[in-house]
Amino acid sequence: MILKAKVYSKIFAFKSLKEVMAKANEEKSGDELVGIAATSASERVAAKLVLSNLTLEDIYNNPVIPYEEDEVTRAIYDGLNLRIYQEIKSWTVGHLREYILEHKTSGDDLAHISRGLTSEMIAAVAKLMSTMDLVYGSKKMRIHSHCNTTLGVPGTLAFRCQPNHPTDNVEGILAAMKEGLSYGSGDAVIGINPVEDNVETVTRLLEMVKNFMTKWEIPTQNCVLAHVTTQMKAIEKGAPVDLVFQSIAGTQKANDAFGVNAAILDEAFDLIQRKGTATGPNLMYFETGQGSEVSLDAHLGVDMMTLESRTYGYARKYHPFMTNNVSGFIGPETIYSGREVLRADLEDLFMGKLHGLPMGIAPCYTNHMKMDQNDQEMGTLLCAMAGSNFFMGVAGGDDVMLSYQDTSFHDDASTREILGLRPLPEFEKWLEKMGILENGLLTERAGDPSIFDK
């Protein structure tokens, strides 16, 4: 491998592929915090130039974390289609970028080659892309999945109704859930983050949502986003679970800190298939985000973007129904500004889809970041144009339990209308039956949660 390049009469030499990957990354506060980011724009350009001339075989032979040391690496390599890899291993990263952006290259073409790409290859090509490149490349790929409803149907945009409450109060959760449903939010999932991570709370919330879904014949799925082991205990005791959730990361060390590993995920995957209440076949829900490994001091010298791509390589083994990216949630130590969040969201959407995952984005932020509502709305529209399968729906755009800002029920409806998108087909029929939607637009009845009190 040639790991040096000349920019403006200065030669930049890099010690390893891991260093090239880190310094080819766009500016991120987390990479700077751990001392692996490019120190100048010229060094960043040099790293991108080096990266563009490396072959996919170079990257295959040099994983950023060795196979023997990390189960995420093993999951990525063990799941690779080696026949497809052999067909494309001589391509340079620059050629891969040109192939992705070529007008005649279809989403089916990308789905085929993706099975021969490691996560580091996918991260590498994304590092060479501009904002418009990422939007254009992402839009080509439509990833379908089915639980009780079908994500990824062309012309649709789904939402997770997120009726969190700071004390897990059922009446408060119901009030927010009714409001979200009345705006057409909830076709991806009705998903609650519990304050109390125990079997009793999880079971109570799952039963409440499932009973409400049954009473009103709502075609969607339920999920309570407790730790996967808590959900498994609830399933074993008979709780009605459609989707099993877990946050995951791009290193074994970070996943250990999350209290999860491949053996636990394998067990959960098997359990939800045998004892879950949804149709399937896609029954897992993952959340990810650039920077979790930095926050946990588990990055192992690898840049945040590459680690995020590795997280998707880990996830695809389980054929999830949803993969949701929350890069802006972690905070300013990893992603500081609105510009960094927008870039991370588009990178993550592209990388996730090229892994074959049904990706959603939460263009979210916390109040101690240098980001505001305008940045969030720009991120929402860009990701919607890029073909995000879903976004969040939070009352007032302010999650009162998790204390962060996300897309509101109003944002959900506005984004659909601006881009001419519809709810998922099963859910749209239900909205029409309820008088909430007509010809793809909200009616006067929309936004009135009292319709569920009659």
Image (cartoon, grey):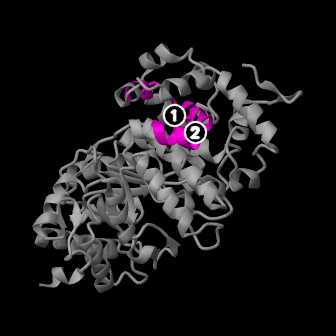
Q: Amino acid at mark 2?
A: Asp
Q: Nearer the viewer, residue 401 or 374?
A: 374
Question: Residue 173 in the image: x percent, y percent?
Answer: 32, 79
| CA gap, disc 2 and disc 1 | 7 Å
Vertical position of residue 61 compared to residue 29: above or below: above
- Residue at the location (76% across, 45% down)? 36
Q: Amino acid at mark 1?
A: Arg
Reply above or below: 116 against 352. Answer: above
Quadrant of the snapshot with the N terminus? top right
Q: Is residue 207 visible?
A: yes
Circle 1 crowding by C-alpha within 10 Å: few under 14, some 14–19, many from 20: some
Query: Residue visible at 53% across and 51% down?
Result: 345
Does the CB distance between marks 2 and 1 fall below 8 Å?
A: yes
Predominant secondary structure, magenta span: helix
Kindly indicate the quadrant of the structure image that contains residue 166. Answer: bottom left
Q: Nearer the viewer, residue 162 or 109?
A: 109
> Horizontally, is 446 left or right of 300 in the view?
left
Residue 12 x %, y %: 84, 30
Residue shown at 44%/73% (left/top)?
A: 397
Q: Is residue 339 left or right of residue 405?
A: right
**Span shown in magenta:** 111-137
Residue 74: mark in rendering: 1
Residue 16 in the image: above or below residue 285: above
Give me the disc on residue 61. none
Residue, x 65% and y 51% (percent of image)? Answer: 298
The answer to whether 268 appears left or right of 132 in the picture is left
Measured as percent of width and height from the top left, residue 161 is found at 32, 67
Which residue is tagged 2?
70
Q: Secondary structure at mark 1?
A: helix
Residue 249 is one of the magenta-drawn residues = no
